[in-house]
Image (cartoon, helix red, strand yellow):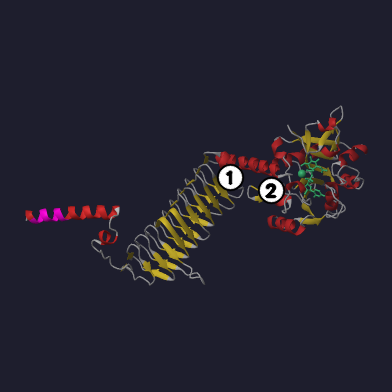
Amino acid sequence: MTQNTPHRPLAVVVLAAGQGTRMKSSLPKVLHRIGGRPLVGHVLDTALALSPDRIVVVVRHERDLVAGAILETVPDVVVVDQDDVPGTGRAVEQALDALDDDFAGDVLVLSGDVPLLDADTLAALVRAHRGGAVAATVLSATVDDATGYGRVIRDADGTVSRIVEQKDATAEEASVTEINAGVYVFEARALRTHLALVGTANAQGEKYLTDVVRLLRDSRLAVAAASAPDAGAALGVNDRVQLAEAARLLNARTVRRWQLEGVTVLDPATTWIDVTATLAPDVTVLPNTHLLRATVVGEGATVGPDTSLVDCEVGENAVVTRTDATLAVIGAGASVGPFAYLRPGTYLGAKGKIGTFVETKNSTIGDRSKVPHLSYIGDTTIGTGVNLGAGAITANYDDIAKHRTEIGDEVHTGSHNVFVAPVRIGDGAKTGAGAVIRKDVPAGALALSVAPQRNVEGWVEKNRPGTGAADVAAKARSAQKADDGAQEEDR
Ligand code: UD1
Ligand code: CA
């Protein structure tokens, strides 16, 4: 039986005002991406999953850029600007000003640069906090290398006494391997009153949020530390080495999730799947494959090796091999590659084929239609059951404007054709090898544009005497003559 307890409000504060100096980047740190999303986007996603009453994000460095990215992900968050006083404590202090004065719930503080914590871990942290008579609960983790993190210092009896930043730590404090994950739950009123007491007398001259822990203890209020079940998920991203590590851990988690949903991933280490991509059961992903942004892969399809799909849709049972594709739709049972380049606006129908060394752009290739070899197809509509010969080129650009090529159903073209757009090929038409199609071809017609072949007998012997070619040609011609003579006698 569930009891009707009164709703205790929860506000989430996300810290995203820092510059991220150690990234050495013109892009603000929290906008660096892993798994196809900015770091702060992952944090917001997790915050949303907790369904809090309020989400407040604190910004300062490149505030328009950061606020823009945040509001794009979650339109109804409150964005607060941090003033010139630096430090995580000041950031939270100003976030609290955006809450009602009488806000009497809990505040969950998240760092915009700690992207891997999942909603279950945070919900457990909030529950643990609410279950104990404490003013604050710190999420901690025990790590092999604590470099750069604040250390959780406990009293002899194990109670949390304070958090010391690496730069302010004595050698003994620095040897502690229990670190502050930068994620906390605070009782809102205690947080507000104690933040007001935090100064900036420390190695970095910043108003540290972590100092609140010591001040709460000074006020005889208890602080707990809850250990993260997965220490790796507490990873904070301060430099590009940690960025790559976070990307790798997130990707391993994403790959594993799809494997458990029935996807075969041959080599998880070289397979990169954005958190926004979707895969159906019985998809096979071969090594060195990147499935990015809103890519969707249908049941039974095989993708890779050496393939990168950005915002693509791959139909059921399609096979995509050694291909680079962006904003392309590949039909069910279709085959693409090896070595194909599909640019935006490519639509390949069911059981169609885009083959080897083929580039396509802004083109529709109908069901069962094939562009098998060495082709450029741009601004083109191709009907169903078409086969384009090797080396088909649509000349879609005349230096001024782009023009369309329209090819009907069941058209078969010869090798090495150029279609000079705008041009239309009617249903069932054919073209000869080497044709340059400048005029529309009516349905069912055969279009030839190459001049009839003329052989100039003996040209090589006459014009290139003494060359190897002339020697063998002379021999071949006399043998042919002898042969013709013998046949004449036989008659
Ligand atoms: C912080 C903690 C440290 C903890 C670590 C966990 C403090 C003083 N230290 O250190 O104990 O182990 O996180 O990853 O809190 N930010 C602001 N405004 C500021 C400064 C920072 O919003 O004025 C934001 C940053 O954008 C970032 C987060 O707060 O998202 C943490 O800041 P950062 O400078 O990376 O703190 P750390 O040195 O990692
Ligand atoms: Ca950090």
Q: Residue at x 75, y 41 (%)?
A: 3
Answer left or right for 424 relative to 25.
Answer: left
Seen in the picture, residue 169 relative to 360 is either above or below; the reply is above
Spatial CA distance of label 2 from label 1 is 17 Å
Viewer-proximal residue among 116 and 354? 354
Q: Which residues are magenta?
A: 481-488
Viewer-proximal residue among 181 and 75? 181
Q: The N terminus lies in which quarter of the figure?
A: top right
Viewer-proximal residue among 100 and 432? 432
- Residue 319 is situated, as x and y percent measured from the top left of the image, at 45, 48
| Residue 272: mark in rendering | 1
**Helix, strand or loop for the magenta stretch, by majority:** helix
Res 380 → quadrant:
bottom left
Quadrant hosting ligand 2: top right
Answer left or right for 248 relative to 80.
Answer: left
Disc 2 element: helix
